[in-house]
Image (cartoon, grey):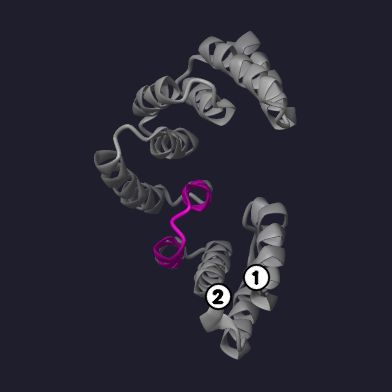
Amino acid sequence: MELARTASKLSAWLYSGVLSHPPTPSASAQAFRTAARNIKTYLLISPSRNEHHTVYAQLLGEMHRFQAAAELAAGDPAKAESEYRKMMALNPSVDLVIEAVTRLEAAGATKAADSLYKARHSLLQEQLDALPDSAFVRNDAAWFMANCNRNVEEAVATATRAVELAPNNAAIRDTLAEAYLRAGKPEEAVRHQTIAVRLAVMAGDDYGLLAKRLRQMQESAKQD
């Protein structure tokens, strides 16, 4: 339980804190390295790591995530890519890889970003080949492509099929809206995001984030 609580706290900090900001020079590099070192130290001394191997792997992945951010902040995208690949091997979450691709690209390391994207896209394609009628596998693939701003037409087609398989799922409809937005079709994005909000309301789910994204898409459509 101790390891699980620590993982939860670290993940909350990672997603809402330091990694949500663009990499800056040496001070941030040192902060990221310190965080990575602290996670490693904790894992080495934790007596419960063998009992919670899934969380243990997650924390190892977060350690590499911190180290990658440190290398980016220090101006070494090649080392950052290497650390991100280690992270992906331990935790291939599409959202984490989207973050990695986005941060590499923001640092001007487009080649490294492309390489990492292709590696994760290949894994997603294997999943699609194995489970072509899984709405959720298709949703993950479409979300990944759209948010990495690559293969956007493929993202639209993949998300469209996911919606056909799960027409009442608000999150999947949201993915289709995002894919259309990235493909330069904001009016279609607004149409599908409106449906996503309505589906969430009908299901009694929290629709605040979906509604916020709808307003952003509506603004984009006005500017188009």
Q: Amino acid at mark 2?
A: His
**In this orientation, does residue 114 appear?**
yes
Q: Amino acid at mark 1?
A: Ala
Residue picked out by circle 1: 4
Q: Which of 131/13 is in front?
A: 131
- Where residue 14 appears, as percent x and y from the top left, is 66, 60
- Is residue 119 on the magenta stretch? no
Which image quadrant for residue 212? top right
- Where residue 104 appears, as percent x and y from the top left, is 48, 52
84 vs 67, left or right, is left
Which image quadrant for residue 31? bottom right
- Where residue 208 appears, as percent x and y from the top left, is 75, 29
- Where residue 90 appears, as percent x and y from the top left, is 44, 66
Contact between labelled residues 1 and 2, with CB atoms less than 8 Å apart: yes
217 w.r.t. 47: above or below: above
**In this orientation, does residue 27 appear?**
no
Q: Which of 36/93 is in front?
A: 93
The magenta stretch is 83-104
Residue picked out by circle 2: 52
94 w.r.t. 64: above or below: above
The image shows a total of numbered marks equal to 2
Point 73% across, 32% down: residue: 206
Which image quarter holds the C terminus? top right
Which image quarter holds the N terminus? bottom right
Badge 2 element: helix
- Is residue 86 on the magenta stretch? yes
